[in-house]
């Protein structure tokens, strides 16, 4: 928790905007980092309804905020409010970060792909040449699929409850990254069994298994077998049912906390204009696991 006595008339603000935001760990993670970095900046979460997004962005800009982290349901709309769109946000068609710059105006970034790939790289997983099953084609699933294709994944199976969404994502990947073979699937046990039989990595990018429905899993446990690596981007709880079952069956697992932390690290880097030291990233990681009441799952 940031000390309120440290705040003064020159304190700058980074805000998280979304609807809802009350559950978010971003203020906890970022304030721990900002305090340790000894910068006079604070992070706050603001609930913003869809019809208030444009006013919220304009208001934050005129009030001198450094930037806005953007979450559901504003990620697509946020790109349209930007003066400059970073290639990361161009790729995904969505932004989870808007940074206000004097000369460039509102700059949009998408950091989910960077954060997910860095999390995978920390456990030694390089998507290049790999076959990956991605369950979920919502905002995060879309960003991950496009970044995995950009990182030269050999084949992507994209399974989604609403198959049309998986299908439209495959069109985008075929167009942008024709060297990655991509197959859209409906979310059935039979489809998952076939896809996982060929896969090196399974990623859950659905909200299935998230608190308060933490008993649920998007994939039946009997389909989880080594050497399949399992990455669940859900971070609350840290140990989702999917990860617990995968570990029980001898698979390597990766939880969603590192991805969340690297997203926040990137946001601080863009908003403050300095890179975040590794010791601070570690502090953010510890703060996040502590807030969730758990330890890391990675090996
Ligand atoms: N670790 C991180 O840094 C990080 C970052 C971003 C998101 N996340 C987590 O990732 C999850 C997805 O986020 P998002 O932003 O992509 O949300 P989103 O855009 O709302 O997408 C939700 C996804 O979950 C699927 N889904 C929801 N309920 C389902 C159910 N009962 N059965 C099967 N599929 C279901 C949706 O399928 P349909 O298309 O059929 O609706 C869609 O693919 C959330 O839990 C979020 O907290 C984590």
Image (cartoon, rainbow, N blue to C red):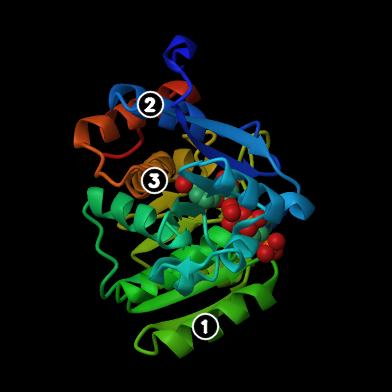
Disc nearer the start of the sequence (1/3): 1
Question: Which residue appears at 38% of the width and 24% of the height?
Answer: 32
The x and y percentages for residue 4 are 49, 13
Q: Is residue 8 visible?
A: yes
Question: Which residue appears at 52% of the width and 83% of the height?
Answer: 172
Dot 1 corresponds to which residue? 172
Q: Is residue 209 left or right of residue 103?
A: right
Number of numbered tags placed on the structure image: 3
Question: Which residue appears at 31% of the width and 39% of the height?
Answer: 298
109 above or below 14? below
Dot 2 corresponds to which residue? 40
The x and y percentages for residue 9 are 48, 22
Q: Nearer the viewer, mark 1 or mark 3?
A: 3
Disc sitting over residue 271 in the figure = 3
Q: Nearer the viewer, residue 159 or 274?
A: 274
The x and y percentages for residue 73 are 68, 54
């Amino acid at each position: 928790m940031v000390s309120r006595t440290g705040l003064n008339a020159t304190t700058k603000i980074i805000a998280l905007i979304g609807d809802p935001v009350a559950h978010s760990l971003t203020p906890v993670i970022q304030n721990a980092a900002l305090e340790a970095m000894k910068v006079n900046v604070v992070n706050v979460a603001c609930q913003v309804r869809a019809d208030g997004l444009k006013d919220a962005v304009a208001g934050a800009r005129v009030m001198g905020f450094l930037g806005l982290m953007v979450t559901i349901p504003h990620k697509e709309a946020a790109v349209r409010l930007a003066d400059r769109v970073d290639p990361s946000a161009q790729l995904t068609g969505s932004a989870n970060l808007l940074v206000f710059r004097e000369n460039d105006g509102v700059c949009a970034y998408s950091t989910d792909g960077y954060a997910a790939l860095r999390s995978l790289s920390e456990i030694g997983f390089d998507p290049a040449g790999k076959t990956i099953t991605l369950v979920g084609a919502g905002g995060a699933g879309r960003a991950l699929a496009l970044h995995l294709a950009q990182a030269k994944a050999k084949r992507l199976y994209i399974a989604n409850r609403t198959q049309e969404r998986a299908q439209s994502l495959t069109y985008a990947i075929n167009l942008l990254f024709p060297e990655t073979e991509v197959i859209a699937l409906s979310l059935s046990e039979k489809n998952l069994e076939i896809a996982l039989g060929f896969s090196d990595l399974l990623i859950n990018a659905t909200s299935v298994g998230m608190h308060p429905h933490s008993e649920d899993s998007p994939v039946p446990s009997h389909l989880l077998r080594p050497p399949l690596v399992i990455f669940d981007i859900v971070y609350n709880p840290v140990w989702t049912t999917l990860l617990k079952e995968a570990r029980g069956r001898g698979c390597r697992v990766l939880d969603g906390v590192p991805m969340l932390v690297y997203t926040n690290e990137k946001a601080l880097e863009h908003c403050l204009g300095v890179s975040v030291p590794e010791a601070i990233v570690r502090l953010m990681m510890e703060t996040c696991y502590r807030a969730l009441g758990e330890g890391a799952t990675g090996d």
